[in-house]
Amino acid sequence: MSMVTLQTETPKGAVAAPVVQAAPPSPVLTADGEPDGAKGIQVTARALKRIRIAMAKEHISPAAGGLRVGITGGGCSGLSYSIRFDSHPRERDRIYAYSQTHLDPTLTDAPPIRIFVDPKSFIYLSGMVLDYEETLMRQAFNFINPHSTKSCGCGSSFST
């Protein structure tokens, strides 16, 4: 049998482990052409950067495609978030475009990064902020949804 002891102070001659600071808050971006405080979909700069990286890996051109966010029935709490890339928007989608100058001011000619939301999902997602979290334990998009009244422990499903 092995014993584990917890140390409350650093022994003499030892170097204390560095303190890992939490990532600073990422600015929340409103879609191009939307007034500040609009009830559309907002993203953080971290999320926009991660979307751009993932689109490049998937060979999705920002000029043609974008990220589709939506809601499906099911999950622990009743509704689940869905997120995937789509090669083009659908006829009735709401389209939110975010200039790449938010990430690099020199990208003035780059096409905007777009998010597509179908009309049914928009009812549950209006006013939402899409963030991206990268820690030692997890790398994931976070849906910060003002309509959510209860969610499961993993955060992938919710109810209103």
Image (tube, rainbow, N blue to C red):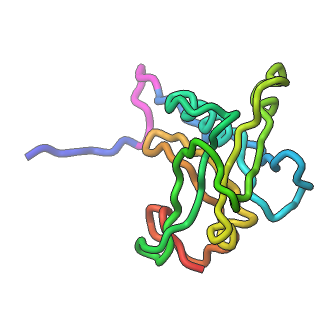
Residue 120 on the magenta segment:
no
**Between 84 and 19, which is closer to the camera in this rendering?**
84
Q: Which residue is the extreme one toward the front?
A: 91
User: Does residue 141 lie above or below 118 as drawn?
Assistant: above
Q: Which residue is the extreme one toward the left?
A: 1
Where in the figure is residue 13, as x and y percent of width and height? Answer: 42, 20
User: Does residue 94 lie above or below 74 as drawn?
Assistant: above
Residue 59 visible to the viewer: yes
Residue 25 visible to the viewer: no
Q: How many marks?
A: 0
Which residues are the magenta region?
Answer: 8-15
Where in the figure is residue 143, as x and y percent of width and height? Answer: 61, 58
Please identify the quarter of the rendering in which residue 99 is found: top right
Where in the figure is residue 136, as x and y percent of width and height? Answer: 45, 39
Q: Residue at x 55, y 66 (%)?
A: 71
Please identify the quarter of the rendering in which residue 101 is found: top right
Q: Residue at x 53, y 53 (%)?
A: 83
Residue 13 on the magenta segment:
yes
Q: Which residue is the extreme one toward the right?
A: 35
**Between 38 and 121, which is closer to the camera in this rendering?**
121
Magenta-drawn stretch, dominant element (helix, strand or loop)? loop
Tell me: 7 left or right of 5. right
Q: Residue at x 62, y 45 (%)?
A: 88
Where in the figure is residue 111, as x and y percent of width and height? Answer: 76, 31
Q: Residue at x 56, y 49 (%)?
A: 141
Q: Quadrant of the C terminus?
A: bottom right
User: Does residue 48 lie above or below 104 as drawn?
Assistant: below
